Structure formats: structure tokens, C-alpha cells
Image (spheres, rainbow, N blue to C red):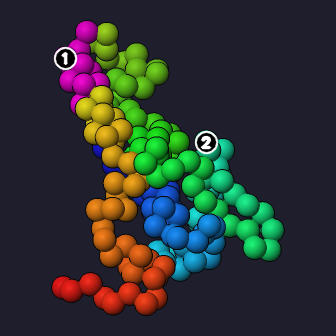
């Protein structure tokens, strides 16, 4: 299974907000940190905001912030919001009627079990876990200009 670019950058947006000590993060700053367009990030923000993972504050001094604490946002929460389809094979599709084994196939059972394990692992990691796993994240994202570059 391959996650989309949207999911990848959704996680990155959340990590940026979690690492940022400021009350609000600006899309322009996030786009600069990850070298992507602001328009691309705005598209990703829509489902994140709708789901409550991100809060948006409008206005001249506006920005975004986490909708709940980083400890309470799991990777599974993000993936469920940003991925459209978890079909690993044709038999996962709703209209999988071409295969005569669709209701009794061992492959279908094995793939469902694998997907369940995938979801279980994602649910065991929070955005906070990802941020804490990288002590130099503030420096790498340009959030702490006074930081010294980490030793190689």
C-alpha cells in the first residue's frame, strides 16, 4: 500500500504545528519549510479542518493550529481523513463481482488481516511521537533560528 502525497503533507503540517511554539502557524512558513506551494497546502487543509484535526484562525494575524493536542492525534486519524481508498486488491472494491471466489477467497482474508495490522500500527503512533522522535525538528523546519545545526 502506498499513501498519497496528500497524506504525507498532512502529517507534515500537523508535525509543524506541534513543533511550533507560537500559538499559530502560517501556511507560508509551512510551505517554505517543506518547499511546496501554499496552494497545495491549502487543499490539504480542507479535510484536516473539516475533521477537527486543524483549527483555522482567519484574519491578518491568523493561521492554523492543532485542533487537539498532538498526543491525541494518531497517524490513523490522519490517514482516515486524507486517503480515499484502502482497497489493496480488486476484491476489496464494492463492485468486485468478476471473481467467483470473492466471498470465500483466502487472499481476501489475508489482505483484510494485513490492513487491520496496518491500521493498528498507525493508531499506536501520535503526531507527538513523531515530533519527539526528532530532537532537531525545530531547527530543521526553521522554527528555531538560534539553534545550532545538529552534529552529523
Say few, some or many: other residues with alpha carbon within 10 Å of mark 2 (under 14 / 14 to 19 / 20 or more).
some
Q: State the image coordinates of residue 106 (x, y, percent, origin top left).
A: 19, 17
Task: Report the disc number at residue 106.
Answer: 1
Q: State the image coordinates of residue 7 (x, y, percent, origin top left).
A: 46, 53
Left or right: 143 with respect to 92? right
From what the image shows, is residue 55 above or below residue 26? above
Q: Mark 2 points at which residue?
A: 51
**What residue is rendered at 38% in x and 32% in y?**
87
Q: Nearer the viewer, residue 148 or 95?
A: 148
Q: Considering the whole magenta stretch, tell me its main secondary structure.
A: helix
Left or right: 152 with respect to 78? left
Q: Is residue 122 visible?
A: yes
Q: What stretch is highlighted in magenta?
A: 104-114
Q: Nearer the viewer, residue 87 or 129?
A: 129
Q: Nearer the viewer, residue 40 or 140?
A: 140
Which quadrant: the N terminus? top left
**What residue is rendered at 68% in x and 67% in y?**
63
| Element at label 2 | loop
Amino acid at each position: 500500500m502506498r499513501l498519497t502525497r496528500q497524506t504525507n503533507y498532512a502529517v507534515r503540517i500537523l508535525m509543524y504545528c506541534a513543533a511550533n511554539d507560537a500559538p499559530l502557524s502560517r501556511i507560508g512558513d509551512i510551505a517554505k519549510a517543506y518547499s511546496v506551494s501554499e496552494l497545495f497546502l491549502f487543499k490539504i487543509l480542507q479535510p484536516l479542518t473539516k475533521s477537527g484535526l486543524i483549527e483555522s484562525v482567519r484574519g491578518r494575524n491568523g493561521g492554523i493550529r492543532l485542533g487537539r493536542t498532538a498526543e491525541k492525534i494518531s497517524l490513523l486519524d490522519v490517514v482516515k481523513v486524507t486517503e480515499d481508498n484502502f482497497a489493496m486488491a480488486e476484491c476489496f472494491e464494492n463492485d468486485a463481482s468478476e471473481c467467483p471466489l470473492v466471498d470465500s477467497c483466502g487472499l481476501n482474508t489475508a489482505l483484510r488481516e494485513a490492513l487491520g495490522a496496518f491500521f493498528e500500527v498507525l493508531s499506536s503512533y501520535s503526531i507527538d511521537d513523531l515530533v519527539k522522535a526528532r530532537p532537531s525538528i525545530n531547527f530543521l523546519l526553521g522554527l528555531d533560528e538560534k539553534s545550532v545545526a545538529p552534529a552529523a
